[in-house]
Amino acid sequence: MTFYYAHKSWSNAPQPNEQTIELWKHVATKSNWRIVQLPNGYYQTEYKDLEDNWVDVTRRETMDGAEQAIDSSIEHYTKKLEFANGPKVVKTFK
């Protein structure tokens, strides 16, 4: 019987470049987001990119749902920024 074992460390994972990190910082700021109402009654969340263009992200049935989607996106990009410098040490042993 043959077993296959693969191991990937953080150094093997593709690292985000400076442009990507700048975009993540920009998108993690709530003032760069907006909600627009579409003709069909849905609400669309959009963020302003680094070139001042609005980029549509999600569509929700309610305004509260759209705002929750923005808050979740901000939380997602904030976590990505936390780990951009490598994994977070949570416990060490002596």
Image: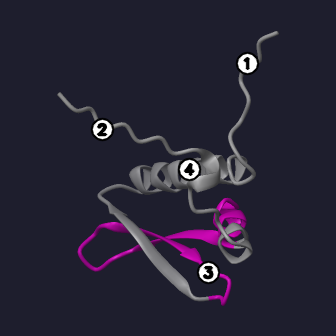
Q: Residue at x 68, y 40 (%)?
A: 87
State the image coordinates of residue 46 (x, y, percent, origin top left).
50, 73
State the image coordinates of residue 94 (x, y, percent, origin top left).
82, 9
Q: Residue at x 68, y 83 (%)?
A: 50
State the image coordinates of residue 45 (x, y, percent, origin top left).
46, 67
The residue beneath circle 3 is 49
Task: State the separation of the CA atoms marked 2 and 4.
Answer: 33 Å
Task: State the separation of the CA atoms marked 1 and 4.
Answer: 23 Å
* Quarter in which the N terminus is drawn: top left
Task: State the separation of the CA atoms marked 4 and 3.
Answer: 17 Å
Q: Quadrant of residue 62?
A: bottom left
State which tag comes first along the sequence, 2 or 1: 2
The residue beneath circle 4 is 76
* Magenta highlight range: 23-52
Which circle, 3 or 1, is nearer the viewer? 1
The residue beneath circle 1 is 91
State which tag comes first along the sequence, 3 or 1: 3
Are there few (<14), some (14-19), or many (20+) residues within 10 Å of tag 1?
few
Number of marks in the image? 4
Which circle, 3 or 2, is nearer the viewer? 2
Task: State the separation of the CA atoms marked 2 and 1.
Answer: 29 Å
Q: Is residue 77 magenta?
A: no
Do labels 3 and 1 touch, CB within 8 Å? Answer: no
Which circle, 2 or 1, is nearer the viewer? 2
The residue beneath circle 2 is 4
